[in-house]
Image: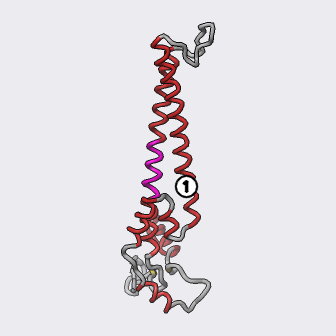
Amino acid sequence: MFFRDSICVLFFVAFSSQGFAQKDSLNIKTTKKTAASINEFNPLAPSKAAFYSAVFPGMGQIYNKKYWKAPIVWAGMATSTSIYLFNNNEYKRYRRAFRQRESGLQDEFTLDNGTEVISRNGLISAQRTLRNNRDLSLLATVLVYVLQIVEASVNAHLLQFDTSDQLSVKPVMISDPIRVEAPSMGLRLHYSF
């Protein structure tokens, strides 16, 4: 019992300092600017960012003025697309060789003297593996595309979030003067807008 009460007291003492929202360290006189930025709420900004990202990947990030995110989106789309194209071309190559071998024709994996470099089961296994890799890379491309649309929309929402100094949380210790021997714990949450 004493141990639990001690932990509670230490917890409240440790976290009894004031916690505030972000402060502008460059300019203290931002009350007029903060009031003006609250009035600049644009409810269509998230949908515009999502639309721009859907039309051209990375454009929603540019609309949100997060220019450094656009090359990341482009790199993700280019990487997954190039892996898809590589696996698709290799799958078609092994599929063509398998069909030629099944028809009795010489394929690219059979030497002139009739020696097979890759067996029939090897061609089947390669087709299965390349098809799975191709499908996974297509899924990765779609996921990158959808995630960048969601990211642009969420970022546009969060850009309009109010982080003024008027929003604050201040936990305090409340002492009870009547019960001095057995201190009582309490928490008061004060917020103002």
Task: Look at mark 1 in the image and give the residue it sits on.
Answer: 74
- Where in the figure is residue 91, as x and y percent of width and height? 50, 29
Q: Secondary structure at mark 1?
A: helix
Q: Is residue 23 above or below residue 135?
A: below
Measuring 52% from the left and 18% from the top, which residue is drawn there?
122
Q: Which amino acid is tagged 1?
A: Trp
Measuring 55% from the left and 36% from the top, which residue is drawn there?
86
Measuring 50% from the left and 63% from the top, which residue is drawn there?
59
- Where in the figure is residue 26, as x and y percent of width and height? 62, 85
Q: Is residue 49 above or below residue 57?
A: below
Q: Is residue 128 above or below residue 142?
A: above
Left/right placement of residue 113 relative to residue 120 reads: right
Identify the image's colour scheme: rainbow, by chain, secondary structure or one colour. secondary structure
Q: Is residue 87 above or below residue 102?
A: below
Task: Locate the N terminus by quadrant.
Answer: bottom left
Predominant secondary structure, magenta span: helix
In the depicted view, which residue is nearer to us: 24 or 118? 118
- Where in the figure is residue 96, as x and y percent of width and height? 49, 23
* Magenta run includes residue 164: no
- Where in the figure is residue 151, as x and y percent of width and height? 45, 61
In the depicted view, which residue is nearer to us: 163 or 129? 129
Is residue 127 visible to us here? yes
Category of crowding for the residue at label 1, using alpha-carbon neighbours closer than 10 angstroms: few (below 14), some (14–19), many (at least 20):
some
Question: Where does the magenta region start and end?
Answer: 138-148
Is residue 172 visible to us here? no
In the depicted view, which residue is nearer to us: 99 or 185? 99
Task: Locate the C terminus by quadrant.
Answer: bottom left
